[in-house]
Amino acid sequence: MNTKDTEQNIAPKFDWKRILNYTWVVKNIPFFLFLAALAVAYIYNGHFADKLTRRASNTEKHIKELEYEYKTVKSEVIFRSKASELIKAVAPLGLKEPTTAPILLVDSTKNK
């Protein structure tokens, strides 16, 4: 029994009821509200970061799609601008490639 008495004297039990009473809780309400506001801000920041990451990912995907479309259209334009393809494209309009050399017109009044 002697050992139990000395252990109680060395490490007394902590009395939570003495600290967590009504006046202590009322006195610390501003601190609890501050902690609640911090928790809300932390949660909002997490959701905002997720939304921002999602938007960045979608924008990146959209840019890649536009890049592929640009490359496709560019190659198509280069292909259609070849001389042989131009001749095929204007044939239904009745236009043909000239076989004779062009005539050079000279202004005779300019020499005088």
Image (tube, helix red, strand yellow):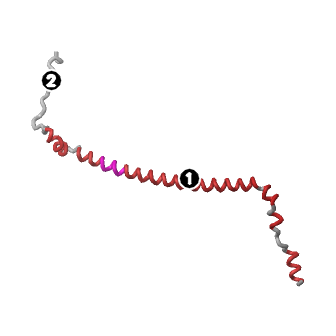
Q: Residue at x 75, y 53 (%)?
A: 30
Q: Which mark is residue 74?
A: none
Q: Nearer the viewer, residue 45 or 63?
A: 45
- SS type, badge 1: helix
Which residue appears at 39% of the width and 52% of the height?
Answer: 64
Residue at the image position 70 percent from the left and 56 percent from the top: 35
Number of residues whose C-alpha sits closer than 10 Å to that of mark 1, classed few (under 14), some (14–19) or many (20 or more): few
Kindly give the residue lying farthest to the top in the view shown. 112
If the image is split into quadrants, where does the N terminus sit? bottom right
Q: Return the disc, 1 or 2, that comes first in the chain's sequence.
A: 1
Q: Give the SS element for disc 2.
A: loop
* Label at residue 48: 1
Residue in the foreground of this view, choosing between 85 and 43:
43
The vertical placement of 45 against 111, above or below, is below
Point out the residue furthest to the bottom here: 1
Residue at label 2? 106
Q: CA distance from mark 1 to mark 2?
A: 74 Å
Quadrant in which residue 90 is drawn: top left
Q: Quadrant of residue 95?
A: top left
Mark 1 touches mark 2? (CB < 8 Å):
no
Give the prevailing secondary structure in the magenta stretch. helix
Quarter containing the C terminus: top left
Image x and y of residue 41, in percent = 63, 53
Q: Residue at x 34, y 49 (%)?
A: 69
Q: Name the residue type under label 1.
A: Phe
Query: x and y percent of residue 89 in the render?
Result: 18, 43
What x and y, as percent, mark residue 81? 23, 43
Based on the picture, tell me whether residue 70 belongs to the magenta stretch. yes
Q: Amino acid at mark 2?
A: Val
Magenta residues, start to end: 67-73
